[in-house]
Image (tube, coloured by chain):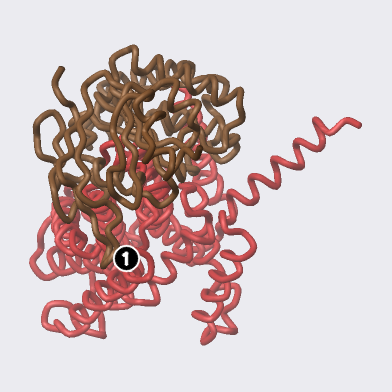
Chain colours: A brown, B red
């Protein structure tokens, strides 16, 4: 197996605060790779670095062997990386299906001219994008909301919608930032199945999550962060029995 | 095959076309036609401005600058140098689009108040240049503009025309021509909005971060919509110059910029038909309030504030949802 995402000695400082310090790990293609740790450990900062929203102050990030430190999020999306957010980023000025079709953006290449005069190429593009978006919404379990305004949807449905949008680009790797936060037990169980299916179908999944039952159940590998540094790295059973992790995070 | 959007869109355009055709039944003199034609031309400009402000969520407080550039490009080239009207109008649009692209790249990095200030400055600079280059522009006294020459066929407000034995006054023809142009402007704007590019633009407004992570080059998209709205302003400015036959630096001025943005906010940001209603209300209002002329800008400011507070979605969307609720009460709402 080759490493899809590789992080070496990564640093991010905001002024004097080191949010992420000397973090290294690698994620193989097809894995479910989770990042856990106490609040403020730097998990979301790590995701923001990997997806290009922040620029690292040191170290290196590689995607498929290519150094991506200075790439913009949209350039990373072109290379097959997509994500969801802890604070959901849904376009409330659009319908549900338009949000997912937005995720298909990179696959739709209509020129400005084709667009302005609504030529057949555009209609073909839009039809295929709409079909794909509807299928994905069915796939994540919000197929009942196709033409619903996003602003009228429930929190749980929006969480699934955001995953559908991330999947719409046919990404190689999808980063989910606390997908289970705020979900009830039934919704979390459905989410677990969904993540498993995404991984089984060949998309690499990176996960930040606090729900230990969920994380331990589906992860192939875990990274534990504490105060911006790597506390431990390993399989779920290794992590569960690591005394440092128990002391800092899991609790005895 | 017509998709769902196409049907909804056609319905809106047909309603607008009917309104444009019906309104002359209530117009009795050239002055009223003049106002109605102004609404249609300025309506085209605000449809373009709405793409930037209403859909992409970026502000421009200097948009009259681009309108004025289009007007003066047409005035100078057709008037002073005798260029043909239509190619001049198109070349003017290209030049103004290029200027918008050059100024847009750096200033669209700014957000919120900073972007407002930068666009305000752009508008001021253009107005000052037009004011000062009096050899070209006639300065504060303004300049005359020849009638619109459509490939050898001259459309003048003061002309008399006859089609199939029916007599038309020039101002009547201008009204219908402007109506046709507005429909074209609306059609192109709607096509843009209902497309992958349009979704990218709306996403810049809805969540810029989301747009970026799904692959939208937000910097490029902001520039693109800034250029498109400037081209709208330039073309409508050129038409306005031909229609009025005389332009002054006021067409590029700060007051007019504020009026344009007020039209968008009042009519309804992100509502293509709403902003045309906004253009109509704010063009007619000064006529109704002619006695309070010196308070005009105060009135516009007040309208802007009250709209923001009491109907943030704007006039047409608010009226639409009120009508919708009433309708729902009558049909549903059984105890």
Query: What is the x, y in percent for residue B130?
Result: 20, 78
The residue lying at 34 percent from left, 49 percent from top is A42
Residue receiving disc 1: B63
Instruction: Give the side of residue B237 with respect to residue A241, left or right.
Output: left
Circle 1 Cα neighbour tier, 10 Å, few/some/many (<14 / 14–19 / ≥20): many
Query: What is the x, y in percent for residue B310?
Result: 64, 63
Inspect this view and state whether residue B318 appears: yes
The residue lying at 18 percent from left, 59 percent from top is B105
Q: Which quadrant is home to the N terminus of chain A? A: top left
Quarter of the view holding residue B312: bottom right
The residue lying at 27 percent from left, 27 percent from top is A173
Inspect this view and state whether residue B163 appears: no
Compared to residue B225, the image places residue A8 above or below, namely: above
Quarter of the view holding residue B63: bottom left
Instruction: Give the side of residue A120 with respect to residue A65, left or right.
Output: right
Residue furthest right in the image: B335
Q: Chain of mark 1?
A: B
Q: Secondary structure at mark 1?
A: helix
In the depicted view, which residue is nearer to us: B113 or B245? B113
Query: Count the marks: how many?
Result: 1
Query: What is the x, y in percent for residue B11?
Result: 51, 32
Compared to residue A88, the image places residue B56 above or below, namely: below
Compared to residue B71, the image places residue B143 above or below, namely: below
Query: What is the x, y in percent for residue B159?
Result: 33, 58
In the depicted view, which residue is nearer to us: A99 or B83? A99
In the depicted view, which residue is nearer to us: A167 or B304? A167
Instruction: Give the side of residue B190 with respect to residue B125, left or right.
Output: right
In the depicted view, which residue is nearer to us: A1 or A85? A1
């Amino acid at each position: 197996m080759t490493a899809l995402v590789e992080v070496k000695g990564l640093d991010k400082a905001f002024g004097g605060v080191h949010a992420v310090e000397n973090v290294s790990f690698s994620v193989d293609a097809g894995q479910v790779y989770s990042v856990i740790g106490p609040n403020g450990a730097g998990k979301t900062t790590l995701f923001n670095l990997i997806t290009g929203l922040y620029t690292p102050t040191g170290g290196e990030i590689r995607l498929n062997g290519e150094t991506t430190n200075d790439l913009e999020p949209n350039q990373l999306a072109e290379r097959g990386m997509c994500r969801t957010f802890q604070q959901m980023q849904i376009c409330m000025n659009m319908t549900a299906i338009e949000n997912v079709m937005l995720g298909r953006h990179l696959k739709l290449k209509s020129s400005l001219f084709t667009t302005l005069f609504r030529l057949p190429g555009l209609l073909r593009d839009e039809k295929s994008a709409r079909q794909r978006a509807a299928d994905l919404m069915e796939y994540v379990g919000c197929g009942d909301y196709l033409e619903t305004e996003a602003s009228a949807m429930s929190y749980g449905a929006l969480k699934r919608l955001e995953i559908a949008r991330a999947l719409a680009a046919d990404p190689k790797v999808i980063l989910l930032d606390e997908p289970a936060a705020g979900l009830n037990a039934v919704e979390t169980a459905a989410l677990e199945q969904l993540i498993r299916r995404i991984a089984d179908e060949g998309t690499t999944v990176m996960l930040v999550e606090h729900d230990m039952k969920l994380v331990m159940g589906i992860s192939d590998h875990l990274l534990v962060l504490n105060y911006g540094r790597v506390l431990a790295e390993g399989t779920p059973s290794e992590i569960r029995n690591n005394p440092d992790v128990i002391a800092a995070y899991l609790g005895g | 095959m017509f998709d769902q959007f196409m049907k909804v869109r056609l319905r809106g355009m047909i309603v607008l076309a009917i309104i444009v055709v019906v309104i002359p039944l209530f117009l009795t003199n050239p002055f009223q036609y003049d106002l109605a034609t102004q609404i249609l031309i300025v309506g085209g400009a605000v449809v373009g401005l709405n793409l930037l402000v209403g859909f992409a969520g970026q502000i421009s407080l200097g948009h009259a600058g681009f309108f004025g550039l289009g007007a003066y490009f047409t005035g100078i080239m057709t008037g002073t140098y005798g260029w043909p009207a239509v190619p001049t109008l198109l070349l003017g649009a290209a030049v103004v689009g290029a200027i918008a692209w050059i100024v847009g790249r750096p200033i669209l990095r700014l957000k919120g108040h900073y972007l407002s200030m930068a666009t305000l400055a752009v508008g001021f600079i253009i107005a000052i240049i037009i004011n000062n280059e009096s050899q070209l522009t006639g300065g504060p006294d303004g300049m005359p503009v020849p009638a619109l020459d459509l490939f050898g066929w001259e459309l003048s407000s003061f002309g008399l025309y006859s089609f199939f034995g029916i007599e038309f006054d020039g101002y009547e023809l201008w009204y219908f021509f402007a109506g046709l142009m507005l429909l074209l402007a609306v059609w192109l704007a709607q096509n843009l909005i209902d497309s992958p590019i349009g979704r990218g633009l709306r996403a810049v407004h809805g969540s810029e971060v989301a747009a970026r992570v799904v692959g939208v080059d937000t910097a490029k998209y902001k520039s693109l919509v800034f250029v498109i709205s400037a081209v709208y302003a330039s073309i409508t400015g050129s038409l306005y110059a031909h229609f009025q036959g005389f332009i002054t630096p006021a067409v590029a001025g700060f007051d007019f910029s504020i009026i344009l943005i007020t039209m968008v906010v009042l009519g309804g940001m992100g509502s293509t038909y709403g902003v045309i209603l906004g253009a109509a209300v704010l063009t007619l209002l000064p006529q109704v309030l002619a006695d309070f002329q010196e308070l005009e800008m105060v009135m516009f400011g007040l309208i802007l504030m009250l709209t923001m507070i009491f109907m943030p979605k704007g006039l047409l969307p608010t009226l639409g949802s009120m009508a919708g609720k009433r309708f729902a009460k009558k049909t549903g709402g059984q105890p």
